Image (tube, rainbow, N blue to C red):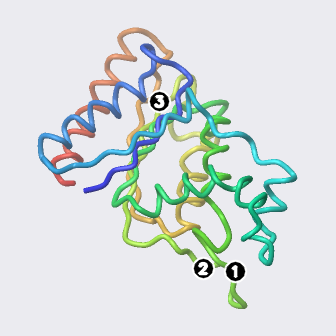
Amino acid sequence: MKLLHIDASPRTVRSITRRLSSGFVKSLRLKNGDLRVVHRDVGHHPPPFISDAWAGAAFAQAERNDPAMKGLLHQSDELAQEVLNCDALLIASPMHNFTISASLKAWIDHIVRADLTFKITEQGPVPLVHGKKALVVTSRGGYVAGTAYDFQEPYLRTILGFIGITDITFVHAEGVNSSDEEREKAITTASAQLLEIAKKW
């Protein structure tokens, strides 16, 4: 199995999503001895925000063989190819202001590319990413489960589905800023869920 592991937290030792996703990968290795992992840390090394020049290159169909255009899209091509080459996608991301982090959004903007991960037809957009599953591990501080403020999971389901990844499982560690006791309880619950998922993968 080829796993693409995306870490999107800006934190290091205090990161709950890093702790949980790392534990999941370790559990997965115990089951799959031939597991190959590509780790992309966009939390600590975010890709650049797309620019006017990048957008021009991405949509310049006739000029894509131009070396200058290729240079502008080099990192985007690499990030998108990692998605296309993997069997499964693991995204570990905290909730920031009820949605995803800016670094994860920057990564998404690079991988959701016309004629690369989706195409536009007369019938509408068609996904080009097939046969992959995804696991999204999140941590949520002040968000209250069940309220209308969750713009994280719906967005990720929509954008991943747009390119063709619809088999998505979410594991949320919720209420991690409530108290030390609630944080550890949330981590323990999420860890148990991830262990069961690793057994099935």
Residue of label 2? 126
Could you tell me which secondary element the residue under label 2 belongs to?
strand
In the image shown, does 36 or 139 lie closer to the viewer? 36
Quadrant in which residue 180 is drawn: top left
Residue displayed at 27% across by 31% down: 23
The residue labelled by disc 3 is: 139
Among the two numbered marks 3 and 1 on one chain, the one whose residue lies closer to the N terminus: 1
The relative height of residue 182 versus residue 196 in the rendered view (above or below) is above
Please name whichever residue, 170 or 87, is drawn nearer the observer in this view of the structure. 87
- Specify the amino acid type for callout 2: Val
Q: Please say if 17 is above or below 70.
A: above
Residue at which label 1 appears:
120
Q: Amino acid at mark 3?
A: Ser
Q: Quadrant of the C terminus?
A: bottom left
Q: Is residue 154 left or right of residue 90?
A: right
Residue under the point 63% across and 30% down: 96
Q: Nearer the viewer, mark 2 or mark 3?
A: 2
Q: Residue at x 15, y 48 (%)?
A: 199
